[in-house]
């Protein structure tokens, strides 16, 4: 009995506040926009009984999804989100791997401190971390004044409000998500494996390519997914650092909902975004599963 | 009047403390315990011995109440304990990992069970003190488990499980985490405490020496079945199967065909080799497959052909020097290897035999046990 | 004894410079007398003064704190329950759905969570305000708590619970006297994580907040959309300062405890 209550409390909470809202999103994505309050049609009408329910379902259709394919704004936004997420993920890997490697090869007594230094930014506000780049990247910002005063450039670069700023922002804010799994994989790596490789005639460099890299594969894959998945739906970074031509689906959804008040289309955008994310999420789960199995 | 030997299992009037009645335990398709009947008597020190996965731990966990039998009943003092949850059983357990509560002191760990019974402060105080004294832990009462050594932790676990004065104490590999020397000392301490408190102990172990040392009776288990339940000396000297003979200690097993010859059994075991003779109470059919099990220390080794019932010639293949003993592996012309053991009773002596020496091995008619399975 | 190699020193230095420089610059410029980012006009704390006089920010900060405290407390209770159910109860109807619902919010984009919750709140006609933000935040924060707590529960020696039962404790007493004290560090980190997540969230709060319940991130967002503001720099500095002090203190304390414990264990073995 007690056990049933214990299960029921979190279960019901998640059903009501996670699953049902999600079903509502799907339902509204199949409805039509209406100039009413709430601004969509059909509505449940309990007074009509069974007939009302049948009518309700007859009114649902995939119109909004068809609309998403016809208006180039949407599919361009999806494509551009994927592009931005992929490029940022690769950049994060490029920046994160050497840090993780350096941490794993650092003297043992240093590692907890380094680890804390990686995690510390994670506890500070995401918004502030994104914001901190605005003063650096803006046209009259610190980066430009530095480069100008060093004579490297003669005109200020336009970085803020471009995709490049978005790449930098994603790389910066999601870096800990890349470093931690890669570090975990590299740290587990038994030092004697590298000694064995060298003993068997590998050079330092070839030992890295033949032993270290393959064995850190799982960590790298996990890190890439941990960056890619949230980057896909990112809203804050493109809004603050990106420009008006930076298309990311999270931003489109937000604007569709608040500026255009088009709930059915916003819901359809959300459903498609989720469908796109299902693939990397499933792949990520499989990677984790494989790792768990490999560990026994 | 001679002192009465402790052997309640031989006394038909004695009521067993625990009775397993046709107990079977299945986990899905896997049968962990297969139709077991077993009686354990008050004040016994009973050992469940077997390789890992043989079901001994499951059997113990059913006594503690962490598993319920799929079929059959378990009686404690004649009462079915099937429906009784673990926290209401007069049975306590000492866990293999000790399971000491890391956030509580030694004193609080020992008092944990007493407090749950709702005993008053003074009673708890006295009882915990008694337990600390019994296990020589008075000095460590205020320490946390991580502040004491492994051996001391083991004694805390014992004190905690004894504090409620259970009818039955279960010990799951209680000495498994200790090093060999400490383990041997602790075995005697355990026996001492068992005797002092008069509690019935059931111990699970995979260490045959430990089982033989501490137990009044040993149950050898394999694949969910009881292979043999007997006193340690019976288990060693009169195993009932090749499995038990082989599991306990070192043994030579020779397979052959039985042939009754007067009051002895003649066993033909290999072409061109003399038949072996053994005494047995068991009846064997003519030509029935049988096995002779002889312990290496009962096999003599000599350079000259000795007199005796069973004499075989072979070559020394290997010598294992164990300090107190030497074991000679003698290969017979048939390819069989017979192990013979000699005690090294003198410190300085030349080894009599060396590799490739031709030697004779021999044993008497009563040295071996004839088994049918 | 392993030492830093030159390559590692370089990569770590560059890496940590990348991680920390933007924040350090932010902190430095919060003390700039000028309103412009690039011009250093001398040291001044006037922006902190302005911030303290800005009622709107103070109100938003209060709302955010209220939301965060309620969220983290609720999420810790729910998340701990959920973790216990996931780790200890292996069979009950709908278990797969349950574990799916625990993990899905971790990877679900904020915009979708926010949108779906807003549509629910409109559907059942609740007035949006602090309560709706707390409900929304608790829903995703409890999933993080449950992941943190369940990793501790998995590592937990289950024979400790069996030992408590064996010594006569009821299942509830076992949880209260044995399980909870042992998983307490994970529960506390779960609480802190939920608190930070709630404090930090912009998107979900924007969807679920009402007109009178603007949170601090929402306030910051609308302020910085227009560009860099020295008041926000000052606010950021305060927030960064609090987190830094908190994290460093916590890690020093846990390090000291670990060293102490190791020492005690070694003395215990030698005795």
Image: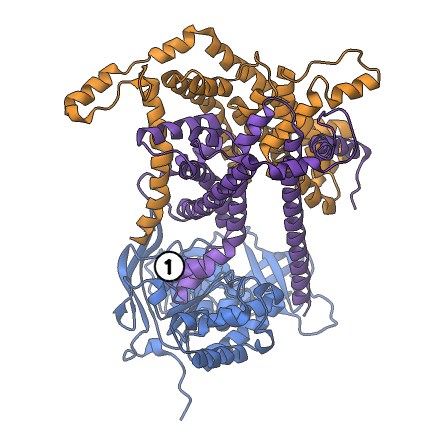
Left or right of B236, for residue B352: right
Q: In this view, does B68 lie above or below A151?
A: below
Residue sitting nearer the eye, B12 or C58: C58
Residue sitting nearer the eye, B71 or C186: C186
- Which quadrant would residue B317 be assigned to in this image? bottom right
Judging from the image, the colouring scheme is: by chain
Q: Residue at x 34, y 36 (%)?
A: A15
- Most distant residue in the bottom direction: B1
Q: The blue chain is which one?
A: B
Left or right of B267, for residue C56: right
- In the rendered image, residue C215, in percent from the top left (x then y), is placed at 51, 35
Residue sitting nearer the eye, B188 or A109: A109
- In the rendered image, residue B334, in percent from the top left (x then y), is placed at 54, 51
- Which quadrant would residue C271 be assigned to in this image? bottom right
Q: Residue at x 68, y 51 (%)?
A: C252
- In the rendered image, residue B10, in percent from the top left (x then y), is placed at 33, 77
SS type, badge 1: helix
The chain letter under disc 1 is: C
Left or right of A119, for residue A44: left
Bin the neighbour count of mark 1 within 10 Å (Cα to Cα): few under 14, some 14-19, many 20 and up. Answer: some
Q: In this view, does B25 lie above or below C241?
A: below
Read off the residue under disc 1. C171
Q: The purple chain is which one?
A: C
The colour one sees for chain A in the rendered image is orange
Q: Is residue C209 visible?
A: yes
Q: How many marks?
A: 1
- In the rendered image, residue B172, in percent from the top left (x then y), is placed at 46, 63
Q: Is residue B243 visible?
A: no
Q: Is residue B341 above or below residue C226?
A: below
């Amino acid at each position: 009995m007690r056990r049933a209550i214990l299960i029921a409390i979190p279960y019901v909470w998640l059903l009501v506040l996670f699953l049902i809202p999600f079903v509502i999103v799907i339902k509204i994505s199949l409805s039509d926009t209406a100039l009413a309050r709430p601004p969509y049609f059909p509505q449940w009408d309990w007074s009509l009984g069974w007939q009302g329910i049948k009518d309700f379902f007859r009114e649902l259709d995939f119109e909004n999804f068809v609309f998403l394919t016809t208006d180039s704004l949407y599919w361009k936004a999806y494509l551009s989100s994927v592009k931005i997420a992929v490029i940022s993920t690769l950049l994060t890997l490029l920046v994160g791997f050497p840090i993780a490697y350096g941490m794993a090869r650092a003297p043992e007594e240093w590692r907890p401190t380094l680890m804390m230094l990686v995690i510390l930014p994670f506890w500070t506000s995401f918004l502030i971390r994104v914001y901190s780049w605005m003063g650096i990247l803006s046209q009259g910002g610190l980066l430009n004044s530095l480069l100008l005063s060093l004579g490297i450039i003669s005109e200020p670069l336009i970085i803020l409000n471009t995709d490049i700023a978005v790449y930098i922002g994603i790389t910066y804010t999601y870096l800990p998500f890349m470093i931690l799994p890669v570090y975990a994989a590299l740290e587990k790596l038994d030092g004697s494996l590298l000694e064995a490789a060298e003993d068997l005639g590998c050079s330092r460099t070839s030992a890295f390519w033949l032993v270290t890299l393959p064995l850190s594969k799982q960590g790298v894959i996990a890190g890439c997914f941990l960056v890619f998945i949230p980057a896909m739906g990112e809203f804050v970074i493109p809004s603050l650092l990106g420009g008006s031509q930076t298309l990311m689906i999270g931003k489109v959804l937000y604007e569709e909902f608040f500026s255009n008040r088009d709930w059915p289309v916003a819901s359809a955008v959300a459903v498609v975004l989720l469908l796109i994310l299902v693939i990397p999420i499933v792949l990520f789960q499989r990677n984790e599963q494989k790792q768990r199995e490999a560990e026994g | 009047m001679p002192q009465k030997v402790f052997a309640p299992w031989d006394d038909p009037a004695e009521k067993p403390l625990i009775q397993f009645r046709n107990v079977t335990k299945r986990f899905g398709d896997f049968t962990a315990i297969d139709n077991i009947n077993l009686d354990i008597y008050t004040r016994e020190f009973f050992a469940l011995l077997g390789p890992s996965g043989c079901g001994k731990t499951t059997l113990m966990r059913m006594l503690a109440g962490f598993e319920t039998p799929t079929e059959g009943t378990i009686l404690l003092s004649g009462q079915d304990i099937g429906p009784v949850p673990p926290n209401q059983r007069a049975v306590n357990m000492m866990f293999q990992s000790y399971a000491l509560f890391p956030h509580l002191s030694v004193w609080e760990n020992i008092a944990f069970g007493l407090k749950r019974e709702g005993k008053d402060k003074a009673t708890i105080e006295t009882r915990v003190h008694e337990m600390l004294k019994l296990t020589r832990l008075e000095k460590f009462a205020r320490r946390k488990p991580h502040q004491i050594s492994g051996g001391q932790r083991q004694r805390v676990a014992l004190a905690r499980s004894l504090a409620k004065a259970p009818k039955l104490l279960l010990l799951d590999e209680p000495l498994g985490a200790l090093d060999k020397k400490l383990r041997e000392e602790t075995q005697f301490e355990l026996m001492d405490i068992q005797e002092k408190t008069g509690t019935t102990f059931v111990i699970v172990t995979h260490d045959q020496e430990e089982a033989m040392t501490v137990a009044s009776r040993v149950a050898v288990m394999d694949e969910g079945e009881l292979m043999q339940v007997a006193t340690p000396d019976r288990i060693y000297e009169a195993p009932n199967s090749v499995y038990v003979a082989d599991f306990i200690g070192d043994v030579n097993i020779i397979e052959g065909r039985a042939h009754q010859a007067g009051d002895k059994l003649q066993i033909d075991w290999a072409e061109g080799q003399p038949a072996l003779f053994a005494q047995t109470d068991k009846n064997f059919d003519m030509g029935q497959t049988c096995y002779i099990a002889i312990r290496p220390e009962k096999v003599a080794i000599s350079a000259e052909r000795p007199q005796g019932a069973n004499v075989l010639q072979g070559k020394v293949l290997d010598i294992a020097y164990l300090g107190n003993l030497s074991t000679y592996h003698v290969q017979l012309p048939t390819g069989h290897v017979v192990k013979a053991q000699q005690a090294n009773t003198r410190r300085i002596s030349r080894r009599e035999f060396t590799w490739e020496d031709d030697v004779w091995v021999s044993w008497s008619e009563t040295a071996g046990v004839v088994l049918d399975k | 004894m392993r030492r830093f190699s030159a390559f590692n020193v370089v990569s770590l230095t560059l890496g940590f410079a990348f991680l920390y420089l933007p924040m350090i610059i932010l902190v430095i410029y919060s003390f700039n007398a000028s309103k412009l980012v690039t011009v250093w006009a001398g040291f001044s704390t006037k922006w902190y003064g302005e911030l303290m006089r800005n009622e709107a920010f103070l109100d938003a900060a209060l709302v955010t704190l209220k939301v965060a405290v309620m969220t983290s407390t609720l999420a810790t209770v729910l998340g701990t329950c959920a973790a216990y159910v996931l780790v200890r109860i292996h069979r009950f109807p709908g278990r797969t759905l349950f574990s799916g619902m625990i993990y899905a919010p971790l990877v679900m984009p904020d915009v979708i969570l926010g949108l779906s919750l807003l549509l629910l709140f409109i559907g059942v006609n609740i007035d949006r305000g602090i309560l709706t933000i707390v409900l929304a935040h608790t829903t995703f924060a409890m999933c993080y708590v449950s992941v943190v707590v369940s990793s501790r529960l998995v590592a937990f020696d289950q024979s400790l619970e069996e030992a408590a039962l064996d010594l006569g404790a009821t299942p509830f007493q076992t949880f209260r006297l044995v399980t909870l004290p042992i998983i307490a560090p994970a529960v506390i980190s779960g609480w802190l994580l939920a608190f930070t997540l709630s404090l930090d969230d912009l998107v979900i709060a924007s969807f679920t907040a009402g007109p009178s319940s603007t949170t601090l991130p929402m306030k910051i967002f609308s302020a910085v959309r227009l560009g860099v503001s020295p008041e926000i720099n000052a606010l950021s500095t305060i927030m960064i300062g609090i987190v830094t002090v908190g994290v460093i203190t916590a890690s020093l304390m846990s390090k000291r405890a670990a060293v102490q414990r190791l020492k005690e264990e070694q003395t215990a073995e030698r005795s």
